[in-house]
Image (cartoon, rainbow, N blue to C red):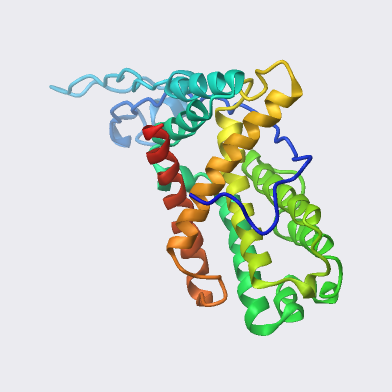
Amino acid sequence: MGTSGTFGGSKNGLVPSWVDEPASPPAVAPDSAEPDSADGDGIGGPDQNGETPLAQPGATPAQSYPPIPRIPASSRLGGARGNMTRGARTSDERALRRGAGRYVRASGGGRSTASRMPNSRAMAGGVAGLARSFANQGPAEALRRFNLEGMAGAPAEDVFVALTDMLCPAGGTIDEAIARDAMLETVADLAASGVGNFDELSADNLREFFIGVVSRSIEGKILNEVGTNAIAAPSDVAGVERAQAMLHDFIEGCVRDEFDARETDLSDLDAAVVDSFVDDLYGAALDLVKALGDDG
């Protein structure tokens, strides 16, 4: 599995804010409802006007159903967290991979996990569309759809930071923060590689940038939901950076393998299929994370 790209990883990668999402309350089936005519005045139900419903001959009393059992997130993701913590503390790459794979499995598989990343998929779709237009229409036209055509000759990192603000402004939901962090971390990778102005980018540069955004967003999703206090477990900074680098290389390798299997450089994609291409790539890459994690 390939893990190296045209530009290397950030030397000072941004660490995402890992926030556990609160568990949802257990679902309760609704009580059996009597027709409105069972109400004393025939208008509304007893909870609307304070009346006691009239007993109907032979009617079965309404019953409350017990809550539907729900596995707490802490239990559902316990195996993933345990492996992630062990991998971080001991620099065990197999445990880190297993933790990522078990997270995807516990989340219902690749497509189910990807469906909960709408902002990340939208961000990656914007980058894919930009790469397609760049190759077929030129840098200025590629940026025109984002009202950034005047930045065609600007430094590439400045253009992508502006694009980030257009596609995903600061503030908002956790998923929006994950998408934004993924884009900015990939911009940092691009800047570290020494790429010059935007209009000088090659098809390889744009492909690597797209793969970086997809990889970083998946990595951020896993760290946000599983990695709280796990990757931060080592007492030394070097240990934290080593664990993050191992996890990133694994996920990027999965994304790259699935991208390469589709035999495209983004320029040949029809505009109408860009979103479905991105959705399919996310789902397949996450399924590969699950499969290879299980083998670890």
In the foreground, 242 or 223: 242
Spot occupied by residue 75 in the image (x, y as percentages of width and height): 44, 18
Q: Quadrant location of residue 249?
A: top right
Q: Pinpoint residue 278: horizontal percent, then vertical percent.
A: 51, 60
Residue 96 or residue 134, whichever sits in front: 96
Query: Which image quarter holds the C terminus?
Result: top left
Task: Report the number of discs.
Answer: 0
Residue 35, given in percent of the width and then of the height, sits at 28, 35
The answer to whether 162 appears left or right of 36 in the picture is right
Q: Residue at x 64, y 79 (%)?
A: 135
Q: Position of residue 268 (x, y in %)?
A: 52, 77
Residue most extreme to the bottom = 137
Q: Residue 257: in sight, yes or no? A: yes
- In the image, farthest residue toward the left: 58
In this picture, residue 295 sits left or right of residue 253: left
Examine the rendered structure and indicate whether residue 97 appears above or below residue 162: above
* Residue 184 horizontal side relative to residue 133, left or right: right
Q: Quadrant of residue 173?
A: top right
